[in-house]
Image: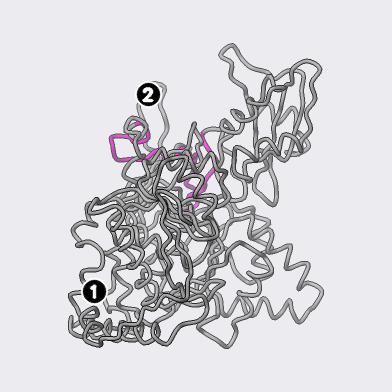
Amino acid sequence: MAVENSRIIWIFMLMGTSSMGYSKFSNLISRSYRSYASLSNIQMVGGIKKDFKISKPVFKYAAQFGDKVALKDVYGSYTYTDVLTHSNKVATEITEILGKNLQERIAFLCPNTAAFVFIQWACWISGNIAVPLGHHQPLDLLEYYILDSGVNLIVTTEERASLMQKLADKTKTKLIVLKDFSRVDLTLNDADNVNQKTNKTHFESIGQPLEFYSKSDALVLYTSGSTGKPKGVVLSHKNLIAQVSSLVEMWNINMKDVILHTLPLNHIHGVINALLCPLSVGAKCIIHPVFNPKSVWGCLTGGVGNSEEQVNVFMGVPTMYVQLLKEYKSSFKKSERMIEYVKAVCSEKVRLMVSGSAPLPELVFDKWKHVTGHSILERYGMTEIGMALSNPLNGQRKPGFVGNPLPGVCVRIVHAEPSGNLSVVVEGDSKETVVLHRGNTSGHLQVKGKTVFSYYWGKPEETAKEFVDGVWFKTGDIAEFTNGSYRILGRSSVDIIKTGGYKISALQIESVILDLPDVEDVVVVGLPDMTWGQKVAAVVKLKENKTLELRFLQRWVMTKLPVYMIPTVLKVVDKIPRNALGKVNKKDVVSQLFHNYIS
């Protein structure tokens, strides 16, 4: 692809096979890692330090797990050595383009494969900030992310090269395309050169000095745009380390785990919980390109007898569990033997199943327990804070509740007094929660701790508004503490719709619909839905003698917003009720126009 500002890096990505030269090189690196651990007097227990604690970026631990499989995707398996080697090579190419500049933003888009990890680690090894993009997002939104965060370089794979080339040209940003090309020979003929490259000094030099990571930013993840345009949440390396440490401790994530990963890789659930956590402790991730219920059931039940392939941890969103139950009914329920087999395997071989990103319906919780023997562990978190609350790993998990604060996290529930002062009614951490106000224990949920984000990119005023005393982050959710556990009651604003694990802005959808020439007024609301949590409904007032069909509306919105923000219900009305200030009572709209959904 001979285009200006673009570059194709031919990298051999182990697509299921390996050359003899590469295998020899990889084995030499693995042996050197083990030698390095021995020379450093590290006490190793099963390949992991005895008093192991997360204190460094994830790639800094790859040395300890050398030839253990880290990732498996549709193309093959990759050891920790493979991942570090590929990441370091990409990092070298990044440095050649950006020079010695550090903390530059690097946007990247790739399928859900090992390539994501290669690029993410490469950003950090080169001392820069990763900005992952979602493949389900329209071009206009991707362009906004790139321009808003001041991206200096775009990295993609061959599958997304055409799309990203358009963005690179439009935003005048340099582009790297990573492409599998088996002619690349990573063999080093001179054994002395291999030894030189694999000594202690070399491994210590991969990435920046540890002091750099203690003071620098790592990641920009974009919010859904609940109060306007999406904001770039800046997470520092210290934030990520704190988030990983907290979850590893709470959920006992360890190197024996095999995690099935089917989540989007531009959201905190998929990036932190299901990827950084396991890779920081030497576990194995099996990454699927998309969520497919049949494939997930195959992984959950198909690895019996092979500990290296048997999935024992699954993380999903409520919509996934609903679809898995539908697939179960279709594929297994007709056979008593399969019913017994599925329950036996899931009960005995799978140790943890997690749900988040949206409330888990109690009916789904109960059905899943009946089918698999598992009480799904529901947790609460968001982009700005990571995970804050979790049901216990061991102990009772109550449907509809999200447990208690994770290690290192403090939460409180506050009331806003008429005077404007805040009254704290509940406050707690992972050890204890204290009720300070008897009676009503519900209110606005606030969070503080090392897991909480640094700032919104380029938005200092908006950042300041979201904190109380510069410490407590205002989540925007209403919570209550009852019977020893926290429960999320909903958003403080009805303009947030939770559908399929996504938090989306009704205001953003309204803005797009109002661009239609025939639309005079619009209000967007969320309606209860068993599968998706909520579905998006548009109430529209049209200009005189105009008509609008749902399918035309959907096609229009699809060109501007991600697919999960497309309305699935359309109601055309003569008038949308607004008060003197031009505001709409959306609760009244739902109860009056969609009473069949709430009855």
Residue 216, position as x, y percentages in the image: 25, 51
Label 1: state its secondary structure.
Answer: helix
Asked if the magenta segment contains residue 483, the reply would be yes
Asked if the magenta segment contains residue 592, the reply would be no
Which residue is tagged 2? 420
Query: In this orientation, which residue lies closer to the viewer: 19 or 64?
Result: 19
Earlier in the chain: of badge 2 and badge 1, it is: 1
| Image quarter (top left, top right, bottom left or bottom right) of the C terminus | top right
Where residue 95 sits, quadrant-wise, is: bottom left
Query: In this orientation, which residue lies closer to the viewer: 239 or 19?
Result: 19
Q: Amino acid at mark 2?
A: Gly
Residue 466, position as x, y percentages in the image: 37, 35
Most prominent secondary structure in the magenta stretch?
strand
Q: Which residues are magenta?
A: 465-492
Which residue is tagged 1? 203
Circle 1 Cα neighbour tier, 10 Å, few/some/many (<14 / 14–19 / ≥20): some
Q: Is residue 176 above or below residue 466?
A: below
Distance, label 2 to label 1, CA atoms, is 55 Å
Which residue is rendered at x = 56% and y = 32% of the image?
508
Q: Position of 88 compared to 252: left or right?
A: left
Residue 581, position as x, y percentages in the image: 56, 14
Q: Which numbered disc covers residue 500?
A: none
Could you tell me how many numbered marks the image carries? 2
Circle 2 Cα neighbour tier, 10 Å, few/some/many (<14 / 14–19 / ≥20): few
Could you tell me if residue 316 is visible in this image? yes
Which residue is rendered at x = 58% and y = 80% of the image?
348
Q: Amino acid at mark 1?
A: Phe
Single out the residue that lies furthest toward the top. 580
